Amino acid sequence: MNRITKLALATLTTITLAGAAQASTLDDVKKKGFVQCGVSQGLAGFSSPDDKGNWSGLDVDLCRAVAAAVFGNPQAVKFTSLSAKERFTALQSGEIDVLSRNSTYTIGRDTSLGLDFVAVNYYDGQGFIVHKSLGVKSAKELNGASICTETGTTTELNIADYFRSHKMEYKAIAFSNNDEAVAAYDAGRCDVYTTDQSGLYANRLKMAKPEENIVLPDIISKEPLGPVVRHGDNQWGDIVRWAHFAMVTGEEMGITSANAKDMLKSENPEIRRLLGVDDNLGQGMGLPKEWAFNILSQVGNYAESFERNVGAKSPLGIARGLNALWSQGGLQYAPPAR
Amino acid sequence: MAVEAKATSSAPRTPVWRDPAIRSLAIQALLLVVVLGAGWWLLDNTRQNLNRQGIASGFGFLDHTAGFAIVMHLIPYSEASSYGMALGVALINTLLVTSLGIFLATVIGFFVGVARLSSNWLVARLAAFYVEALRNVPLLLQIFFWYFAVLRALPPPRESVTLFGAFFLNLRGLYVPAPVAASGFGLVLLAGGVALVAALGLGLWARRRRVATGQDFPAAAVSLGLLIGLPLLVAAATGFPMSWELPALKGFNFQGGLVLIPEFVAMVLAISLYAAAYIAEIVRSGILAVNRGQTEASLALGLSPAQTLRLVVVPQALRVIVPPLTSQYLNILKNSSLAAAIAYPELVSVFAGTVLNQTGQAIEVMAITMAIYLSVSLAISAFMNWYNGRNALRER
């Protein structure tokens, strides 16, 4: 049986059979001893396993941050790799505790799926990659093109909107799995492969001759990517949201995984508060007071995570751009920790 | 009360709880209440849970704008169409690949099954190899194989393989000229209809004549001539009232004409070759089930080997073949859902995939999808049972 069918049936069963009373996600997580985190099926820089099955990436770091906050152990995470089609159903059915899978925050998803987006850990936009031999320089020249994409994503709708509003024609070939979409594009089935621009760079690494494909400069949509939790469990939502904010605040205050221990002796009241030296900011979320210290010392701040996964130190080499701190011209902004 | 009073007067009184008729009625009523109650509890629970979790419900979404494109649609469809239309497009695509798959699998399976019984060593071994190779490899792998094998073998659009400047074969599919009807084309269609009726009548007449006189009439050949010849004659007389729309390279791809997309070709190839391997074995078992004496008697009566197969062996073999064949046909329908893996826009890919994701209404979408598969399966089953009944041994 198809995986999505299974998941849909699982949702059906939980929704039809589950009683009204449900334990909070935090209690469930503490009881089983790990966070079950939904990730992609392998997207370099965001969530991908190495040859030993260890996951790494920007989205993975967020899951590890949540585990560090709850257990003080970033390894207390189990990963479920999900296709775009399966992801929301897996979260609804309770198979995973948090979905951190480069998912775009939209009003439809936030309000009608029974889910909540709690943060934006990567500001992205949809782009196109084309074979160099086509000689195309801009998305406006793509009239009549065949476009490979993945089903169940916002990209499918964005290209429809973009081509309609520019009075251009196209053929969409929508695959249920991203790897097949990339393979079909690589085999020449399509002129264009489209997804979020960060994903284009990541997927280019998988192609037979990466250098013969170019990413077009056009961005046709806003794609704020972020973690998702089930609607109605606000405590768990707070934990995931503030795990992300703690990493951003860490960068703002210059707390890194290397210097976090020394920072405990800092005189700066903001740092002392965040790291739980004076106050217990974790109390309201049901977390120990060193929750933020654990995140920053064990996973690192947002800049560290960004640089090692998608930034200049990674094969993707993506610039900070929109994802720089607000104080440096970007959009990453965390509410004050007080 | 009145009934009870009567019963006491005529027969020795049986207590109500010992009366088998009343008791079984009561048990059935109780069961009905339990089943309905459980059903209601499930429905009510679902509704409450959906409300509590804030998940949208209901079937209203079918009228909403779909907003996504579908690469292959046999009925008019655009991004502005509704989810309901997308469902229609997807269903037609599923039915198309299923019916073509059933047809091709039956033809190929029949030939391979007969070939496996051939007295020619090479033919029999080749058929055996075909069956063992294809039915022992998972269908999904075969689909990928055909898809990527087909893709790798084909040239890009600008280097298409061309035939007469009208047929183009490339990575994006096979482009053929599309017929465009002009005024007066109705006459040609009418001629076709007349030819069809005439051919049916001819068949009936030839059969009656054979039963009455024993003389054979080549009805099949004459009918074929009629079906092709008459419309052609009328078309020539009216000056061929139709034109062809030729595919032409515009920008990246060919525009115009009809196109067979590689996803469709790969899916039909994979599903029919796979099912044919099973059908071949079913056909072989059916033929082996016919007593050797039947063949010998038929040959002794002077029928040719071809006639023996067609008139004596196959009709009897069908009794054994049809019931397992039905299961294979149902499998073809269900296996067509694997096409989602290679982006062929069928029911599971478009409706239980894209639409489910855009709307998030898993319960409604899955319920509709399952209901559709169930009804199509039941329809196939009903037809095959009817056909089986027609072929069944009639005891006189």
Image (cartoon, coloured by chain):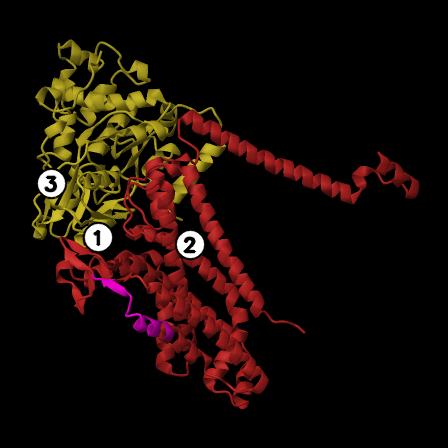
Q: CA distance from mark 2 to mark 1?
A: 25 Å
Q: Which mark is residue A315?
A: 3
Return the disc, 1 or 3, that comes first in the chain's sequence. Answer: 1
Letter of the chain in red: B
Query: In the image, is residue A248 above or below residue B235?
Result: above
B243 in the magenta segment: yes
Q: Position of residue A66 (x, y in %)?
A: 27, 26
The residue closer to the viewer here, A75 or B256, is: B256
Question: Marks 1 and 3, how far apart in space?
Answer: 23 Å
In the rendered image, the vertical position of residue A301 relative to residue A214, given as above or below: above
Q: Which residues are magenta?
A: B230-246
Say which chain tag 1 marks.
A
Q: What residue do we see at 15% from left, 42% from top?
A: A128
Mark nearest the camera among 2 and 3 is 2
Secondary structure type for disc 2: helix
Q: Which residue is mark 2?
A: B334
- Badge 2 vs badge 3, beta-carbon distance below 8 Å: no
Q: Residues within 10 Å of mark 3 (few under 14, many from 20)?
A: some
x then y, percent, for residue B170: 19, 61
Name the mark on residue B249: none
Q: Amino acid at mark 2?
A: Lys
Q: Nearer the viewer, mark 1 or mark 3?
A: 1
User: Is B165 in the magenta?
Assistant: no
Quarter location, residue A163: top left
Q: Nearer the viewer, residue B195 or A266?
A: B195
Q: Is residue B182 left or right of residue B253?
A: right
Q: Position of residue B342 (x, y in %)?
A: 29, 53
Give the residue at mark 1.
A184
Chain that appears yellow: A
